Image: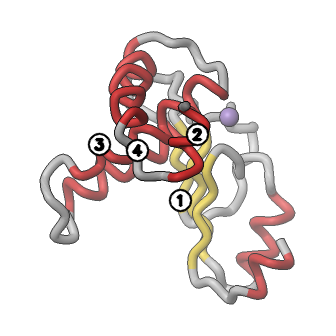
Amino acid sequence: MEALVKEDPSVVITVDCGVTNFEEIERLRSLNIDVIIIDHHIVPPRWPNAFAIIDAKKETETYPFKFLCGAGMAFKTIQAILRKDNFNLPEGWEKWLLDVAAIATVADMVPLLDENRALAHYGLKVLRKTRRVGLAALFK
Ligand SMILES: [Mn+2]
């Protein structure tokens, strides 16, 4: 938290945490830092006062698949953003993020069904070609 605040960000995006981090989110708000929470944990009865909460388990959430891991949720968020503005990236560019989404899906032990199965399946294909040095070493 101290290292984060020193960076003087205007926005903080959490992945795989945040829905229960009331104290940290209040601190960031007090410093005029917007917080966007991307989480897959069950939203408690009282929600943190974040700028936005993206959580498949939120009661009002209509997205049909409820079991994405945090990185899976982040991947879906990136897909949604790219549908609004592709930032001049080639179509389908986001597939190169699937290696990370696949590792997170397996490591977070979410059920390997439906979209999670697709993320893991195609993510392993991307992992074979990954340019991330650490992941390539791990994959070997
Ligand atoms: Mn998780």
Q: Which residue was labeled with disc 4?
A: 130
**Percent position (x, y) of residue 58?**
56, 35
Circles 3 and 2 in contact, beta carbons < 8 Å = no
Residue 95's disc is 3
**Percent position (x, y) of residue 12?**
61, 70
Rate crowding at label 4 as few (under 14), some (14 to 19) or many (20 or more) other CA atoms within 10 Å.
Answer: many
Q: Amino acid at mark 2?
A: Gly
Q: Earlier in the sequence, mark 3 or mark 1?
A: 1
Vertical placement of 33 versus 42: above or below? below
Q: Earlier in the sequence, mark 3 or mark 4?
A: 3
Q: Earlier in the sequence, mark 1 or mark 4?
A: 1
Q: Quadrant of the C terminus?
A: top right
Of tags 3 and 2, which is closer to the observer?
3
User: Whole-Å distance between the Cαs marked 3 and 1?
Assistant: 25 Å
Of tags 1 and 4, which is closer to the observer?
4
- The answer as to whether callout 2 falls within 8 Å of ligand 1 is yes
Question: What kind of element bears circle 3?
Answer: helix
Q: Amino acid at mark 4?
A: Thr
Q: Is residue 63 left or right of residue 58?
A: left
Question: What kind of element bears circle 2?
Answer: helix
Closest to the observer: 1 or 25? 1
